[in-house]
Image (cartoon, rainbow, N blue to C red):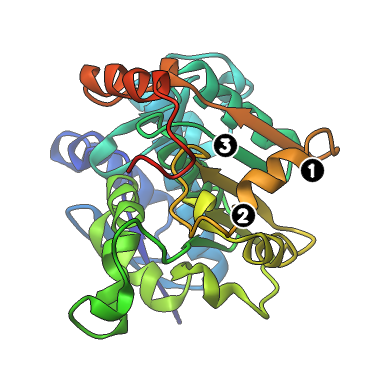
Amino acid sequence: MAEKLIYLEGVDPVDFYGVNNVRFNKFIELFPDLKVVSRGNEIRLQGKKERLEEFEDKVDLFIRYLRKFESVTLPDLDDILSGSTGNKMDASGPDDEVILHGDSGRKVRAITVNQKRLVEDGIDNDLLIAVGPAGTGKTYTAIAMAVKALKEREVRRIVLTRPAVEAGEKLGFLPGDFKEKLDPYLQPLYDALRDMIPARKLIQFMEDGTIQIAPLAYMRGRTLDHAYVILDEAQNATVSQFKMFLTRMGPDARFIVTGDDSQVDLPKHEESGLIQALRILEGIRGISIIRFDDRDIIRHRLVKSIVKAYNSEQYPKGGTS
């Protein structure tokens, strides 16, 4: 007897279960051999493994249908459960630009031209390099792409990494143990994940290694395969670190590198691996370089003006923070 816990992601439980559980009862009727217990956005199942997987597949299809068409009639649900939706799921719909539906049904979209290009180039390229100023959504979009691939079982895990280098701070002088010292550097990655994955499931993924967040130095000696791997703040990776990271790439891995080549916090004598990569990797088949600019900034309206003001000054690399 196998067990499975299904989390309802990106959908309101009321929409999923239906009034008086009328929709959910159809699932139960289709799988009378399973023991099914539901509570909020969690469904616990017991039964034969293959039947549990069939149940989960039907739930996934129903949620995708609901996201795409924003309503499901009972005849529609009958078609979904019988597998007779035909080509309807392939038709265009209102969610064509949505990357995924995050926690509580939040729609995570590619909004700007370069965000959309990042998503599109990810279809045909296994290494993407997204470079540009703060606030352009490079990292957020990259993480959304990784979470989507994980949810659709295109990869087995997500690995997120950053160099532990920031302007004006040294790890040794920060309070706490090693993890507590590192968490401030990795916090933006946690924040993005929390928007896209329910809290309990995210904890589970972190505990079982499905999602790993670690400083760049921890990548040495590893081969990263069947994974979506994101290197964030890549401008602060040295040349040797950057090369080390890229050579971790397994045959079925996808890599995204994000960074801002105007905000290098390395010592002045140390060249940024990102800046070197932008020179030497351009034009290699399978690698796409997307250059974001101030038109992609989606934070507060003042951020765009601030970036323009700093760009108008002739600061040396790393001169602003």
Q: Which of the 4 image quarters holds residue 133?
A: top left
- Image quadrant occupied by the C terminus: top left
Q: Is residue 156 above or below residue 255?
A: below
- 260 or 143: which is nearer to us? 260
Asked if labels 2 and 1 touch by Cβ distance under 8 angstroms, the answer is: no
Tell me the distance, in whole angstroms, between the alpha carbons under discs 1 and 2. 14 Å
- Residue 143 is situated, as x and y percent measured from the top left of the image, at 46, 46
Q: Earlier in the sequence, mark 3 or mark 2?
A: 3
Establish if 5 lies above or below 268. below
The numbered mark at residue 163 is none
Mark 3 Cα within 10 Å, few/some/many (few <14, many 20+)? many
Q: Residue at x 50, y 19 (%)?
A: 96
Circle 1 sits on which residue?
Answer: 280
Q: Is mark 1 on a helix, strand or loop?
A: helix
Along the viewing direction, whichever of 234 and 249 lies nearer the viewer: 234
Residue drawn 34% across the image and 56% down it? 167
Q: Distance between the residues labelled 3 and 1?
A: 15 Å
**Residue assigned mark 2:** 271
Q: Which amino acid does label 2 sit on?
A: Glu
Residue 54 left/right relative to 310:
right
